[in-house]
Image (cartoon, rainbow, N blue to C red):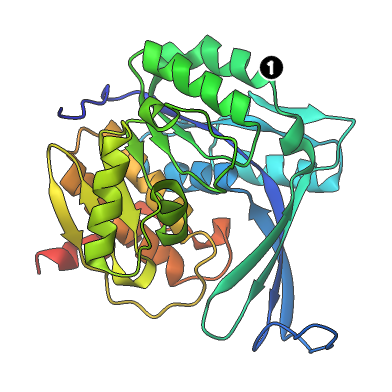
Amino acid sequence: MTLETRPGGKIAIVGGLNMDLFIQGERLPHPGETFEGRSFSTGGGGKGANQAVGVARLARDPGTAVMIGQVGDDSFGRELLSSMNAEGIDCEFTRIDPSQSSGVALIFIDDSAENYVLPVYGANATCGEKQVEDFSGIVRGMSVLLTQQEISLDVTLDCMRAARDAGVTVVLDPAPVRDNQPDGFLSLAHVITPNQHEAESLTGVKVSDVKSAEKAALELRKQGTPVAVVKLGEDGAYVASSEFEGYFPPFKVTPVATVAAGDAFNAALAVGLTEGKGIRDAVWLAMASGAVAVSNEGAQESMGTRSEIEKLLATVNA
């Protein structure tokens, strides 16, 4: 089956919004040890919001990204909404829950550019029927639904079903992996984009190299997802679909932080599909977007512009 995405529509992102609290240092402290960090900063985050920023910076048309989610009625929530509006993201359906604090994530980045994330989801955890109703009301104008698993699984499932019924392409980032996923869940997605850990959790295949990534991708297809993209971090990605199957080597960049590389990847993949690209070309665009993000600090701050991503992408055929 060839994946056909409705061209020219908007991209709905249903997912989490967090304020990220970054600590950079040589390494994590050992249990019972106090170990001095090097720097501290804050910035907008959450997989949903990160992907919305990635879409907004890469899309050719303003207002392509539509963010559906929830923040608390606090300074973090107001800052998150302000920054997303400044990026040109449609936040009409980003609600405020006065009974909850906004989501936060403590992120430690060590000297190898590896990241460790400890989130407290706050208002993200109270997403429910209102978010499903919001998405269902606009689904006919969408080309792609981008979703993750930082909010209620019921909300994610209902939005995926609504998208399917409306002929909207569903791109699922299965993070964080949930233990209570129902049978047939993966078949609601047209495209799934796990990293190595997530692919292993979903398939039982230990992913450590290209060969095992291929095995995991094929297993994900057997579970009902037409396109499986297993991300291998600094080692590239493997794609399995009826249209294209094969390995994508990584771009050669100097890593600074990997915090939002996967979100940058998914955002660009969605944009590529909306622009009518086939899987192969859409994944190359996603690979370039992820590589640009790895080269920069922060989460949303790391998302590349169209010109930055296309400049790197041009080196594929250079």
Q: Is residue 37 left or right of residue 285?
A: right
Name the residue at the right extreme: 99
Q: With respect to residue 252, does 226 lie above or below?
A: above
Query: What is the x, y in percent for residue 306?
Result: 34, 52
Say what secondary structure mark 1 lies in.
Answer: helix
Query: What is the x, y in percent for residue 18?
Result: 70, 48
Q: Which residue shows up at 22% across the image and 64% down it?
A: 211
Looking at the rendered image, the quarter that the N terminus falls into is top left
Seen from the viewer's position, the closer of residues 299 and 15 is 15
Q: In which quarter of the image is residue 178?
A: top right
Q: Quadrant of residue 233?
A: bottom left
Q: In which quarter of the image is residue 122?
A: top right
Looking at the rendered image, the quarter that the C terminus falls into is bottom left
Q: In this view, does 73 lie to the left or right of 265?
A: right
Query: What is the x, y in percent for residue 9?
Result: 35, 23
Q: In this view, does 206 lie to the left or right of 65?
A: left
Callout 1: few (<14), some (14-19), or many (20+) C-alpha neighbours within 10 Å? some
Q: In this view, does 280 lie to the left or right of 262?
A: left
Query: What is the x, y in percent for residue 174?
Result: 48, 44
